[in-house]
Image: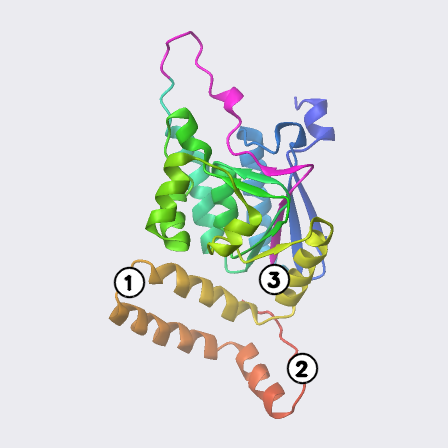
Amino acid sequence: MADLKDINNPPILTAKRSGYRIITLNRPERLNAFNEPMHLALRVALMDAEADKECRALLITGAGRGFCAGQDLTTRLANEPGEARVLGGALEAYYNPLIRRMRAMPIPIVCAVNGVAAGAGANIALACDIVIAARSATFVQAFARIGLIPDSGGTWFLPRLAGDARARGLAMLADAISAEQAEQWGLIWKVVDDAGLQTEADTICQRFARAPTKGLGLIKRALNESASNTLDQQLDLERDLQREASMNPDYQEGVRAFFEKRKPNYSGRR
């Protein structure tokens, strides 16, 4: 039988808006650190959003004063002093599928970082398409502090977003950086005042909810594959994806709206 506390305080909250959904990480007493129930609930929330053809964008944020502190380390304690606790299973079962699903989803994912984003929490934020952060937010690759390596895509995202030198500093020194620094280094899209974070996130999602969803999904795919493609391979991919995009009715609507000097009315068909 489910714990009554879990029923009254689900680890993930979901809300439907016109054309998009909001997913809130909801373990504020643990700075939204991940445990197994939270992973399972987030998996369901993402699957439901992807299956909903009316959902054209997704917003992920955190409840309380933090975005996500990464893994809940209370679930990682060894049973006896000196006993080894071999990690890797949780990555295979939960974190790696989560990152893969987020990157592959055919709709844009906006992340509103409302406080500390640490460890896997920072890298889950970086896996989103558009990341905005409150001015008071911080980012920290905390893994080295306990003798681990950045996971959840951290060693892939950091050098590509911030460059090799900064990636090594972030990963090996494990110092926290401000939202402003993260913006300056290209880790995130934008910093906003704390009071305006939700409004800015909603505005971006509303914009995506009116956009040509198929085209945005293909942009995600092209950018994802560019990381491992040669220029020739990427040119071929652009050709193929452009053909696919042009067969969607939103392309024809965009062209008609351009010539008729009006705002397009995209169907969002994907």
Residue 184 drawn above or below residue 169? below
Q: What residue lies at 51% left-to-right and 76% top-to-bottom?
A: 248
Along the polypeptide, which appears first: circle 1 or circle 3?
A: 3
Figure quadrant of residue 244: bottom left
Q: What crowding class fits label 2: few (fewer than 14 Cα within 10 Å), some (14-19), or many (20 or more)? A: few
Along the polypeptide, which appears first: circle 2 or circle 1?
A: 1
Numbered mark located on residue 263 in the image: 2
For label 2, the SS is loop
Q: Position of residue 27 (x, y in %)?
A: 64, 32
Q: Position of residue 192 (x, y in %)?
A: 65, 55
Question: Label 3: which residue?
Answer: 56
Figure quadrant of residue 174: top left
Which residues are the magenta region?
Answer: 56-84
Instruction: Tell me the CA gap for discs 1 and 3.
Output: 28 Å
Q: Position of residue 144 (x, y in %)?
A: 39, 31
Are the two marked residues, 3 and 2, in contact with CB atoms closer than 8 angstroms? no
Q: What crowding class fits label 1: few (fewer than 14 Cα within 10 Å), some (14-19), or many (20 or more)? A: some
Specify the amino acid type for callout 2. Answer: Lys
Q: Residue 77 colored magenta? A: yes
Figure quadrant of residue 79: top left
Q: What residue lies at 36% left-to-right and 53% top-to-bottom?
A: 163
Q: Residue furthest top?
A: 80
Instruction: Tell me the CA gap for discs 3 and 2.
Output: 18 Å
Asked whether residue 128 is in view, the answer is: no
Along the polypeptide, which appears first: circle 3 or circle 2?
A: 3
Residue 204 drawn above or below residue 212? above
For label 1, the SS is loop
Numbered mark located on residue 221 in the image: none
- Mark 1 vs mark 3, foreground winner is 1
Q: What residue lies at 64% left-to-right and 65% top-to-bottom?
A: 209
Specify the amino acid type for callout 1. Answer: Asn
